[in-house]
Amino acid sequence: MFDVLFIGSGQGAWNGAIPMSQAGLKVAVVEEGLFGGVCSNRGCNAKITLDKPVELVRNIEQLQGRGFDSVPQINWPDLMAHKHEVIGRLAASNEQKLVKAGVQVIKGHATVTAADTVTVGTTEYKAEKIVLALGQLPHRLAIPGQAYLRDSTDFMALPQLPQRVTIIGAGYVGMEFAAIANAAGAEVNVVVQGHQPLREFYQPYVERLVVSLRECGVRFFYDQRVESVTKSTAGLLLQGANQFALESDYILDATGREPHVTGSGLENIGIATNKDGIVVDDHLQTNVAGVYATGDVVAKTQPKITPVAIFESQYLAQLFTGQTTAPINYPSIATTVFTSPRISQVGISPTEAAKSLAQYTSETFAYAEDWFRQVQNETDGSLTLVFDQENILVGAVEYSHEAVDTINGLLEIIELRLTHEQVQRFIYTFPSLQHSYFRKV
Ligand SMILES: Cc1cc2nc3c(=O)[nH]c(=O)nc-3n(C[C@H](O)[C@H](O)[C@H](O)COP(=O)(O)OP(=O)(O)OC[C@H]3O[C@@H](n4cnc5c(N)ncnc54)[C@H](O)[C@@H]3O)c2cc1C
Ligand SMILES: NC(=O)c1ccc[n+]([C@@H]2O[C@H](COP(=O)([O-])OP(=O)(O)OC[C@H]3O[C@@H](n4cnc5c(N)ncnc54)[C@H](O)[C@@H]3O)[C@@H](O)[C@H]2O)c1
């Protein structure tokens, strides 16, 4: 009998499983695929490896005639080999981390057969608590020719970069992969259902990102309803309503991800789900006592990203080891779209602030006027800060190559509600990114 058995070994699982085991609980993790789940093996880590040269190329482009005379070309097969080398070893190392911490690793497909029982193959495992950390699966467009569509995992394993890449969807995956494929030399088309890419992000900055990607050659097709894909003599033909037709060599279906709630026997014990995933209470417990859920599979309003999955997993470790009995209390969550430039944001958005002018004020700083950003000739970026009535920073969004570091730095100020006087106590290295923004807070 285990104290805790996780189904799934992604960020929503192992970050909790290890401290639980280290605290003396008898813990098992069942995984049918690669240890570490999506983020480690075919999500964040793989994506950021492919993005690294993109970021460098874009930075060098900004300095043409200012120290650089040419822009290096990305060698896709070499980059892909590098990605395989860096990412390929992670699954084994993730598995070893669990083993070293004393977690029992079980390989295979898990099916929940009772509220305290999970079956893998022909073996039954009993556990006092079961944690469903099942993640999400790519949404597949149900259109004729669906078999020609590829997903993010396929894209991140492409040995050669196709010449013409069409991406359906302008969410995180659509925009990030458009930026990568374009910088690596492909002709890129993005087919958008409505006319608002990256709906969760601050739209004035999204519009600037679209302008920047257009200047690099990415073509956006707004308000499209795709209907079919067929093989043509020269590639794949994507067709849609109102005579829309687009030929390319590769089509990426980036129309979202869906909670992985089928195929693991949830119905055997009546686990409640909705379109967003498994329904949980404020302690991440499902409607069945002793069965919990964590990570992307949870139906929640928080973004389905790695740091949130980690936070939930660690919360369960505190809960199950008696360090807390309190409900989960999510802090401020920073989100980023890893395009070049990036958009990163946290807290109250300027759009929300504009709707409550009595409550909030916001201020925008253009990097064209900031000497530190001019060093790298970054003229297009800017930062918008949102303050409450007490003049405490409550939100921030940046559009720039360094947006991640700026927003991560401001996150602490927002979460701890630091006053201007407290922030001025920090003596940062100069010159540095922190120094370029901390006086503004
Ligand atoms: C292309 C891409 C890029 C991303 N980039 C970022 C990023 O830059 N930053 C960020 O924060 N987030 C990013 N994400 C999101 C991030 O990957 C997820 O939020 C994170 O992986 C969620 O972790 P999880 O543990 O909930 O689920 P997962 O990582 O999906 O793990 C679930 C695991 O459960 C296993 N499983 C499911 N059912 C069973 C079963 N019945 N038996 C056994 N095993 C089972 C699966 O094999 C899988 O390994 C990205 C996602 C994608 C797709
Ligand atoms: N940087 C990051 O943190 C990061 C990066 C990648 C993925 N993720 C996570 O992975 C998940 C999936 O990302 P995603 O980009 O696949 O999903 P998403 O939900 O962000 O975007 C899907 C997009 O597809 C569009 N779409 C849906 N149906 C369409 C259709 N028929 N035609 C055209 N467009 C259509 C939607 O309007 C939306 O813009 C998200 O939960 C996200 O949190 C995070």
Image (spheres, rainbow, N blue to C red):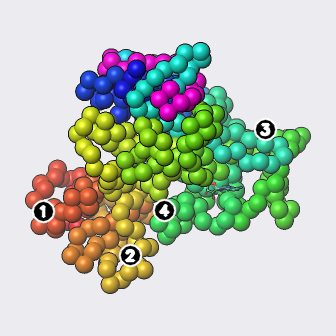
**Residue pictured at 60% horizontal, 17% vertical:** 121
Q: Amino acid type of disc 2?
A: Ala
Q: Is residue 139 inside the magenta stretch?
A: no
- Nearer-N-terminus badge (3/4): 3
Tell me, yes or no, if residue 289 can be seen here: yes
Nearest the viewer among 423 and 37 is 37
Q: Does the residue at mark 1 contact the one at mark 4 (Cβ under 8 Å)? A: no
- Nearer-N-terminus badge (1/3): 3
Q: Position of residue 42 (x, y in %)?
A: 54, 33
Q: Amino acid type of disc 3?
A: Ala
Q: What residue is shown with label 1?
A: 422
Q: What residue is shown with label 2?
A: 353
Residue 147: which disc? 3
Q: What residue is shown with label 4?
A: 201
Taking the image as shown, residue 124 lies to the left or right of residue 422, namely: right
**Magenta part of the protein: which range?**
100-117
Nearest the viewer among 269 and 14 is 269
Q: Position of residue 22 (x, y in %)?
A: 27, 24
Answer yes or no: disc 2 within 8 Å of ligand 2: no
- Answer above or below: position of 188 versus 346: above
- Answer above or below: position of 368 versus 76: below
Q: CA distance from mark 2 to mark 1?
A: 24 Å
**Residue pictured at 25% horizontal, 43% vertical:** 324
Q: Is residue 106 inside the magenta stretch?
A: yes
- Nearer-N-terminus badge (1/4): 4
Q: CA distance from mark 1 to mark 4?
A: 29 Å
Q: Quadrant of the N terminus?
A: top left
- Answer above or below: position of 315 versus 27: below
Taking the image as shown, residue 220 lies to the left or right of residue 231, namely: left
